[in-house]
Amino acid sequence: MEGNNNIAMELKRTFKSGITRSVTWRKNQLKALLRFIHENEDALFEALYQDLGKHPVEAYRDEIGVVMKSAENALKCVDKWMAPKKSRIPLLLFPASGQVISEPLGVVLIFSSWNFPISLSLDPVIGAISAGNTVVLKPSEVSPACSSFLAKTLPLYLDPAVIKVVLGGPDVCEELLQQKWDKIFFTGTPRIGSLVMSAAAKNLTPVTLELGGKSPAIVDTLSNPAHVKAAAKRILGGKFGSCSGQACIGVDYLLVEEKFAPQLIEVLKTYIRKFYGENPMDSKSICRIVNKNHFNRLNNLLKDPRVSESIIHGGGMDEKKLVIEPTILMNPPLESEIMTEEIFGPFLPIITLNNIQESIEVINSKSKPLIIYAFTNNEKFKEQILSETSSGGVTFNDTLVQFICDTLPFGGVGQSGYGRYHGKFSFDTFSHEKAVLRGSFFPEIEPRYPPWNSAKLRFLKMAFRFDYFGILLFLLGIKR
């Protein structure tokens, strides 16, 4: 704790030295980060297995591959991102010119989450490095193997005077939040996010909050059996296939027409068996629940008799192994905790509707979700979803893949988050866009100065309408 008291001030001095501003330094750090990933792949696989039981394939897909992709993209694009952008200036101000220059914010604090402890740590760091900042990374204490590996190994690759990893629990987080930062980037729950935002407000520190919420999947009645199978696989992948449902971008619940539900449920059950075998509790392709506290929280969701009675598939639990079987529930009460709180685990409630258009009313009755998934071929319904709901994003006919698209911003709205990142959006998140106008001493626009008169008012009215012909006549003394 003692060594973290003035870490922000220490990095502020480093930032003021100017070392992070050059494109060469930024590229060297990105290359070093790529070396870190390449040279430590097996060790990262092991740490992810220790913390969450992630299979190496899942670990590569959701963690290592994500970081490699982001770092390589930043390395390729950082020159273009840093280049000043020309801005059009009104002809009235000729020969003035304008541009927007992206400058680093300074010293940034990044809090990462335990469910994707490598990608959610390093992906924001890539944006902060690309933008030329000094960085403190605070990984989650809930994933200790990954956090300690980052703290021990990352300084061997990245400049330790500029990028620091700090370990610890809530007391360390609180101490860090008492210091003055130029930017705070937080991934976690809305409850902790509100505490981070409150602490940041004391110093008027800008924040990005990557939170979560109950992200629904709307499943329209699909007539093509191939489409039904594809939707089922993608729903299962988006629910159980990513950290056993412990993912903010995972499917939280399904909205389905009552007449279509039986067909969909049978296909879902078929693919659960294909993905995880007849005994999913022994499958090597399903993650553990992160710890006993989270296991108990999930177990408590089923203690409501009305909820437990709604289970139509699965429900098995192994407290010793911290494993929960992929579980489907049919119409649990809408007022029950499983339908009012983010589940963050391998329970998939299905809510049936008379008409699929009712899904919009259900979604709008809750806080704005991080993502809405919708499986439909109805273009009119797609437009209705886009125009009548609000969410961080919308993905049609797939799940999760939006997260790896660097050309799409990733972030929430309202309770699901504030701000965005990925690709150029990460660079922008950790940059200040400075407006620059390069003026001249000639010509002078005299009507902008006192003493005021009616002629100056006429000139200003034409100027704000960009009525250049009228201004020319005015200067020539010609009346229209």
Image (tube, rainbow, N blue to C red):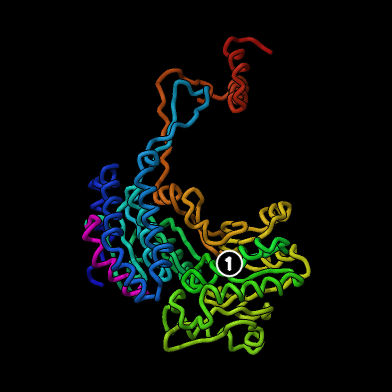
Q: Nearer the viewer, residue 135 or 359?
A: 359
Count the numbered circles shown: 1
Question: Label 1: few (<14), some or many (≥20) within 10 Å?
Answer: many
- Residue 380 is situated, as x and y percent measured from the top left of the image, at 73, 52
Is the magenta region chiefly helix, strand or loop?
helix
Residue at 40% across, 76% down: 53
Whether residue 198 can be seen here: yes
The C terminus is located in which quarter? top right
Residue found farthest to the right: 354
**Horizontal placement of 451 versus 9: left or right?**
right
Q: What stretch is highlighted in magenta?
A: 141-160
- Residue 238 is situated, as x and y percent measured from the top left of the image, at 54, 66
Q: As shown in the figure, which amino acid type bears the numbered disc 1?
A: Lys
Residue at 29% across, 47% down: 26
- The residue at which mark 1 appears reads as 233
The N terminus is located in which quarter? bottom left
Q: Is mark 1 on a helix, strand or loop?
A: helix
Q: Which of 450 and 118 is in front in this view?
A: 118
Residue at 47% across, 55% down: 404
Whether residue 182 can be seen here: no
